[in-house]
Image (cartoon, rainbow, N blue to C red):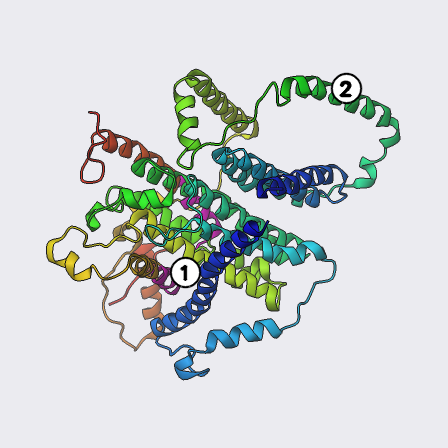
Amino acid sequence: MTVEQIVFYVFATLTIVSALGVVTVRNSVQAVLCLVLTFFSAAVLWMLLEAEFLAVALVLVYVGAVMVLFLFVVMMLDVDFASLKQGFTRYVPLGILIAIGLLIGLYWVLRGELFGLEAMPEPAKHAADYSNVESLGMLLYTDYFYAFEIAGVILLVSIVAAISLTFRGRRERRGQSVPSQHRASKDERLHIIKMDAEVAQDDESETDDLEKAVGEKSGRTKGESS
Amino acid sequence: MIDMIVDGLIIGFKISLILLPLILAVAYTTFAERKLIGYMQLRLGPNRVGPKGWLQPIADVIKLLMKEIVIPSGANKALFLIAPVLFIAPSFAAWAVIPFNAELVLADINVGLLYILAMTSIAVYGVIIAGWASNSKYALLGSLRSASQIVSYEIAMGFALVAVLMASGSMNLGEIVKAQEGPFWHWYWIPLLPILAVYWISGVAETNRAPFDLPEGESEIVAGFHVEYAGIGFALFFLAEYANMILISVLTALFFFGGWLNPFMGIPYLEAATDWIPGTVWLLLKAAWFLFMMIWLRATFPRYRYDQVMRLGWKVFIPVTVVWLIILTFMIKAGVGPWFTGRGVL
């Protein structure tokens, strides 16, 4: 057995086991983590096919971003497993039927005649300086340019749709406005007022006058007495 | 079969050649940090253990190793124990593609840039799982803050790396450095100056360092996601944080400051005078400067508020990078020298 075969069998087993774990594990957080492991081991399998760009992109996009948000949501949820399992026996026959249908469909698409070694010969190994990224970029920006652009537009539309679905009108928030903080100048925040020195004799009337003067001149801003 | 084992041993030896100095560097970075912040605050810092305090990090490591591991009641035991490992593994794995000089690199892969980005982004799992499995509200709050912070800043960081990729025309870290060949004004810090600022600040935010250390804000949520960890578990989080700091410093040196290149390359007398210095030393010197900057930042700035962190990431950095990507496109197409000469089409 070569190293590649060992790596393949280890990670293929890991992919299947963790994929089964996603649907059998009781705790939903653990199920999400199983899904992460599935993505990860699938990325290793892609790496074996010399599709290093796709493999790393899978880890980057799905493991690094999408599943983090999944985990985020699942952690916050309080799932009541008892109520989820209530109709289990009722729906089992239907579930089995769908599973069988799916299996037949998958077999029909992926059977040996279409995906065997005769139909799809083993791809030749590329030289060490072969760049998966470069050839993928070449294909995407030449032969499949329209498909690529259309995919971009679809993504844009879905972003707009997601924003408009969650947008519930403007809300007045008392947040911090950094531009207005930057625009603020000393003149509008600080009043320096001039007044006569306080003479300590008739306390009562003097302090009254002082308070009045400060109040009139500057409102709520801080006054500075000279 | 024998070949395979020998190959495996050689690779293992190479990995240990990177990891052992890294762990030592982490230990002495903590010491440097305490000393530097001490001097910045007019204190002495640790000076009791060993000559001038030089054995302090060793003493710290021994102390952390001897401590009891406490597992909180109601915690998810398996996940609680695996979280520190999940946090530290990517921060070590990312070092595989770092070129220390033109030949010295463990894995010379074509998608090095993406690999680095992927590795720094999956470290967030360690934080989230640690917070969730601890069964503690402070830990959960800390991990939520950390997750949103890392996901937000990753976008700006990714865009910044797209700019580096466009400028150099390669995702291989060695090729990126080679594309900057020349004296120090040939490096990408000049044409990519705003990108450098965005990358550097996002890097500080991704490593959860001050002033972006909200996930472990002591004043409001005690120590955030690792509040329930003691002993070796805490040590692993600590180790990973510092390994990430060093990684970000090295990456900044590679992407924007010519990596292992001699800054005086091509300057008549200075090049001859500095020719004997090996490239690895230049890289480490440049990285050390950025590491110093991180410690300096921590001693200088107060912690950001949560909404300010989010505003900076989404409303400032992402627009800046997108605008600069457009400007960069024109710069490359116009063949602005000395960085993009020979690539212009206008």
Residue that badge 1 annotates: B302
Q: Which of A222 and A113 is in front in this view?
A: A113
Q: Give the number of the mark in front: 1 or 2.
A: 2
Question: Is residue B338 at least partly visible in the picture?
Answer: yes
- Identify the residue shown where x is 26% and y is 47%: B189
Q: Residue B17: within the magenta?
A: no
Please tell me whether the stretch drawn in magenta is mainly helix, strand or loop: helix
**Disc 1 to disc 2, how far (Cα)?**
61 Å
Up-down relation of residue A186 to residue B180 (above or below) = below
The C terminus of chain A, quarter of image: bottom left
Q: Where is residue B158 in the image (x, y as percent from the top left)?
A: 42, 40
Q: Which of B122 and B96 is in front in this view?
A: B96
Residue that badge 2 annotates: A101
Disc 2 residue crowd, few under 14, some 14–19, many 20+, Cα 10 Å: few
Task: Tell me the chain of label 2.
Answer: A
Q: Residue B297: within the magenta?
A: yes
Q: Give the range drawn in magenta.
A: B291-316
Q: Where is residue A110 in the image (x, y as percent from the top left)?
A: 67, 21
The N terminus of chain A, quarter of image: top right
> Viewed as shown, does residue B69 lie left or right of A3?
right
- Identify the residue shown where x is 59% and y is 60%: B226
Identify the secondary structure beneath mark 2. helix
- Identify the residue shown where x is 42% and y is 78%: B54
> Viewed as shown, does residue B245 lie left or right of B239?
left
Q: Where is residue B177 in the image (x, y as percent from the top left)?
A: 31, 46
Q: Which of A140 and A113 is in front in this view?
A: A113
> Viewed as shown, does residue B258 lie left or right of A57?
left
Q: Inspect the image, locate mark 2, and give the three-letter code of the amino acid beneath it.
A: Gly
